[in-house]
Image (cartoon, rainbow, N blue to C red):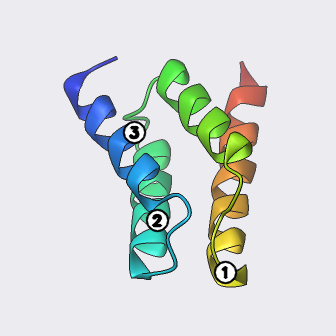
Amino acid sequence: MSDYEHIVLSAVRYALGRMSYIVNLTVNYVLKDIEEEKLSKKCLWLIQEDVRQSKYLGMECDKKDWEKLLKKIDEVMEVE
């Protein structure tokens, strides 16, 4: 994984479980990177696993953002 991907993964891990604007901002940033194909399958898999294994995803609005991200990652991973 690239240094950039490590930074993105760190941002995701920081945002997990938060109840603030950072969840939406992070999810939207990662979604943009997915669309632009900036993230490797390994990075996407790690993000997917981190979100799925998280015991708490925040408030309902935060949970919806994480679910939206998981859905997109599932779609991308399914293509392979």
Q: Which residue is mark 2?
A: 28
- Disc 1: which residue: 59
Q: Which label's residue is closer to the chain start, 1 or 2?
A: 2
Residue sitting at x 48%, y 27%:
43
- For label 2, the SS is helix
Q: Are marks 1 and 3 in contact (CB under 8 Å)?
A: no
| Residue 68 drawn above or below residue 79 | below
Relative horizontal placement of residue 48, taking residue 3 as reference (left or right):
right
Q: Nearer the viewer, mark 1 or mark 2?
A: 1
Distance in Å between CA atoms under marks 1 and 2: 17 Å
Q: Secondary structure at mark 1?
A: loop
User: Which image quadrant is residue 52 in?
Assistant: top right
Front disc: 1 or 3 = 1
**Res 65 quadrant in image:** bottom right
Among numbered discs 3 and 2, the one appearing first in the sequence? 3
Distance between mark 1 and mark 3 Cα atoms:
21 Å
Q: Residue, x 66% and y 33% (percent of image)?
A: 49
Q: Label 1 neighbourhood size at 10 Å, few (<14), some (14-19), many (20+)?
A: few
Q: Mark 1 belongs to which amino acid?
A: Met
Q: Secondary structure at mark 3?
A: helix
Amino acid type, mark 2: Asn
Locate residue 73 relative to residue 15 in the image: left or right: right
Q: What amino acid type should be assigned to the residue bearing mark 3?
A: Leu
Q: Nearer the viewer, residue 5 or 34?
A: 5
State the quadrant of the N terminus: top left
Q: Which mark is residue 9?
A: 3
Q: Who's the residue at 67% across and 48% down the image? A: 54
